Image (cartoon, rainbow, N blue to C red):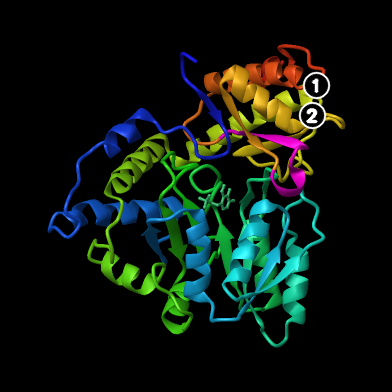
Amino acid sequence: MPGRHHLFVPGPTNIPDRVLRAMHRGSEDHRSRAFPWLVLPLLEEVARLFDTTAGRVALFPATGTGGWEAALTNTLPPGATVLLPCSGQFADLWGTTAGNLGYQVERFEDLTWGAPPPPARIAEVLRTDTERRIGAVLVVHNETSTGVTADLPAIRRAMDESGHPALLMVDGVSSIASLPYHHDAWGVDIALTGSQKGLMLPAGLAILALSPRALDAVHVVNTPRAYFDLRPMLAQSVEGYFPYTPSIPMLHGLRESLAMLFEEGLERVWMRHHRLASGVRAAAAAWDLPLVARDITCASDSVSALQVPDGIDARDIIASAFNHQDLALGSGLGRLAGKVFRIGHLGDLNEGMLLGALGLVELALADGGVRVEFGHGVSAAQRIWWGGE
Ligand SMILES: Cc1ncc(COP(=O)(O)O)c(C=O)c1O
């Protein structure tokens, strides 16, 4: 189809032209004297993104899934237990990764998909763990499958009140660079993200931030590690180098994407995401399609999962959007397959782009058999963005 493709999956997201241009360059010697001029300031900017001065950051040529593995194996001894509030597909998959690596995964299996991880219950389990078996609590900050954001400060408070020393490990794959995140102030021990969502890059970087306590653990645990070993990574990055060949175009792209985010101002970036999300939520309400998110207090500002009426298969809507409108929507994952479609509203995005997408969603809904009044969702979003009536 002529014209631009409409990419509204919750990652990978649109890559801004500035970032594409920054990545478009020939190879360089990653052992040269000049290479640290790229890497050292970049690591400082990444630390600024995570809002950490006490901790350290690391960049692995990998994706978010690699970040899960790196976080676990570098800070938890073999066979340790992790506590996992399991309220979505990505929490579930992180638990599977931990299990595959030989960790004992204690899951809250009965959580409603659509509710955030419950701080009080985490504290309750930690309080009863008198033998201190639990090494870490694993929290997906923004569950991309359900469009639900966890309350990390409340979880930290609950963990502190329990007096348990478990590490707080956070998946920020669809939150960091889109939603507020404060590594030091929120007392997170290990956070990880990927490059292909709020950072507006291709997939290919797993980015980690570690607190001083997590850094201590890196040097104490004896878990077998190879590619994802943080010890050589942290040792060499002090000098501005990597233990192996990094993807250099990705590093240039990351510098540019961070420059864009800081030029806009992180708070404004978060506010823009909130504003865009509010418009999408208004459109969903106008279409009478409930969000998977239980209520507005936990509804994500980076992705919305919309439930379709009984008897309608959301996959038909997604297929029609792709085939006829050149619009890519996110599918329902795991137990939500066929029941929801997801609209990603994160990254390099503005109201005009979203209005176009919402108009196309209306066409795809009609194609998929949902009764929809054309223009209702679009005008609901317009009213939010115009300032209301
Ligand atoms: C919350 C969350 N965690 C982890 C992942 C896995 O990341 P990746 O696909 O980069 O390995 C995703 C991917 O969408 C995600 O949304």
| In this view, 188 is above or below 35 | below
Residue 355, position in %: x, y? Answer: 60, 19
Q: Residue 285: in sight, yes or no?
A: yes
Q: Crowding at label 2, few (<14), some or many (≥20) Cα neighbours within 10 Å?
A: some
**Residue span colored magenta:** 333-345
Residue 386 — which label?
A: none
Please indicate whether residue 274 sits to the left or right of residue 31 in the image. Answer: right
Please indicate whether residue 200 sits to the left or right of residue 135 in the image. Answer: left
Residue 253, position in %: x, y? Answer: 33, 42
Question: Residue sitting at 34 percent across and 40 percent down?
Answer: 259
| In this view, 95 is above or below 147 | below
Q: Secondary structure at mark 1?
A: loop
- Say if mark 1 contacts mark 2, CB within 8 Å: yes
Quarter of the image where one finds residue 170? bottom right
Residue 370 — which label?
A: 1
Direction bottom: furthest residue: 131
Give the residue pinned by disc 2. Answer: 289
